[in-house]
Image: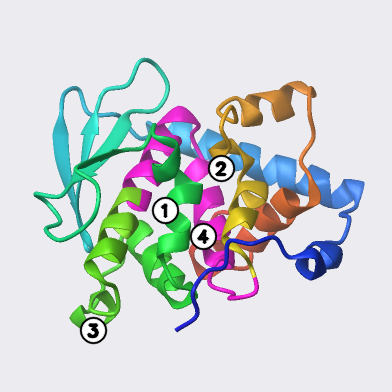
Amino acid sequence: MAVQRTAGNAVAAARVQRVTDEEREKANARRERWAKRADKRGGTQPAASFTTHQTPFGPYNERPGRGGAPYISSNREQYPGTQGDDRYVREGQNQFDGLIPTLDAEHFDILVEALKGGQLSEEQIDQLSDEQCRAAAMLIGIAKAEEVREPGAIKHIRSALRRQANPEHEAPEFLNDFPQARIGGAQHEKRVRSGKTRRASPEVETILDASSSSDESMSD
């Protein structure tokens, strides 16, 4: 069992290579295409009122937010024996970086498959504990909420989650791979497009990695 590590890793950081301007421009163009295609399809629509959604791992709840992404939650009634009476995405410990360490590296390919709408076997789901199923369901809800906030984000998130399947890729690196998940990162994509900031190497690599994955082969 390869548990996602949460401590810093200087060796891993040293392996990060600077990307070229050409690669950065390619990533920018690809990310913009994802957004345009999502908009053309009508985008992901938030629920108009409190709604419970089902995932292969269990349910999560959505309620309208104050502009931007909706609020995502789960509770112990839905997941008996787990910790926390009611988990809301807006609480720091339940953001991406709070939930990702709950999963083991081998769970992330399963999670990505579920995010793509794939069918999971009982054997795959049985690999996860109740706490891990709750975290996985919450991650699906949060990913879809981010797609509401920023069309095209879900492809970016899938690629970032897929990188977590490498046991050497630590949980905190997710925030470098998908900076929109950082506290205060909601406007990251808009700042990139306006030229106020530029993508760092890990994010560029994450976006470019998506083009070689099976779910992006027809729409990179």
* Pointer 2 residue: 34
Q: Callout 3: 10 Å neighbours few (<14), some, many (20+)?
A: few
Q: Callout 4: 10 Å neighbours few (<14), some, many (20+)?
A: many
Q: Is residue 220 left or right of residue 93?
A: right
* Pointer 3 residue: 123
Q: Residue at x 14, y 41 (%)?
A: 52
| Circle 3/circle 4 CB separation < 8 Å | no
* Pointer 1 residue: 99
Precedes in sequence: disc 1 or disc 3: 1
Answer whether residue 32 is magenta in the image: no
Which picture quadrant has residue 70? top left
Which portion, as a residue range, is magenta?
Answer: 139-168
Q: Nearer the viewer, mark 4 or mark 1?
A: 1
Precedes in sequence: disc 3 or disc 4: 3
Q: Residue 161 bears which disc, if any?
A: 4
Precedes in sequence: disc 4 or disc 2: 2
Assign the C terminus to one quadrant of the image. Answer: bottom right
Calculate the distance from the C-alpha at mark 2 to the C-alpha at mark 3.
33 Å
Give the structural element (helix, strand or loop) at label 1.
helix
Give the residue type that dot 3 points to: Glu
Calculate the distance from the C-alpha at mark 1 to the C-alpha at mark 3.
22 Å
Measured as percent of width and height from the top left, residue 118 is found at 31, 66
Q: Is residue 56 left or right of residue 175?
A: left
| Circle 4/circle 2 CB separation < 8 Å | no
